[in-house]
Image: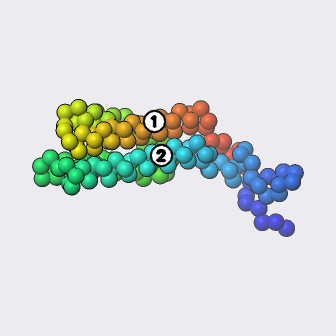
Amino acid sequence: MLNLPRGAALRAGQPGRPTPDDPAHAGRPDAVVRATRAIAVSCLIALVALGLAWELWLAPTGRGTLALKVLPLLLPLIGLLRFRMFTYRWLSLMVWLYVTEGVVRATSDVGVSRWLALAEALLALLLFAACAMQVRWRLKHPRPTPGPP
């Protein structure tokens, strides 16, 4: 006898493969959800790295105290990795602070700081887009819930 996962349906020609409506498949995110999470996590980590490098080494504006601005970006990392919808929602609002800072400093700073600010604004916009796509997709395509046993 085959050792099948609990709830796996036997289909013709595909024994032991769970279908999307099976409880065994209910916890797996689809490709769009995984892709938007990968983009969001990558942008978040890049924003943290950019903020630290910018304020500590590349173009510091004092004693490095502005490097503290990246601390709020560390809070949503675990929520993003765990596919928490609430985290994607509030991060999509918080990220506008970084877009604003990037745009203001890109138009007022000179030299390398201007390019770093532009990179911050673009990364923050990409992070917003990934969060928005994640939320919209998950609201339109809810995961199947397991039925009665």
Residue at 23%, 45% in the rendered image: 112
Separation of marks 1 and 2 at Cα, in angstroms? 9 Å
Q: Is residue 103 visible?
A: yes
Label 1 CA crowd tier, 10 Å (few <14, some 14–19, many 20+): some
Mark 2 highlights which residue? 39
Q: Is residue 76 visible?
A: no
- In the foreground, 46 or 94: 46
Residue at 78%, 66% in the rendered image: 3
- Relative to 7, is 104 above or below? above
- In the foreground, 117 or 15: 117
| Residue type beneath disc 1 | Ala
Q: Which residue is at the far right?
A: 12
In this image, 129 relative to 1: left or right?
A: left
Instruction: Tell me residue 115's x, y (percent).
Output: 28, 41
Instruction: Tell me residue 48's x, y (percent).
Output: 32, 50
| Residue type beneath disc 2 | Ile
In this image, 86 relative to 11: left or right?
A: left
Mark 1 highlights which residue? 129
Q: Which residue is at the far bottom?
A: 1
Q: Earlier in the sequence, mark 1 or mark 2?
A: 2
The image quarter containing residue 121 is: top left
Secondary structure under badge 1? helix
Label 2 CA crowd tier, 10 Å (few <14, some 14–19, many 20+): some
Q: Are marks 1 and 2 in contact (CB under 8 Å)?
A: yes
Residue at 79%, 52% in the rendered image: 9
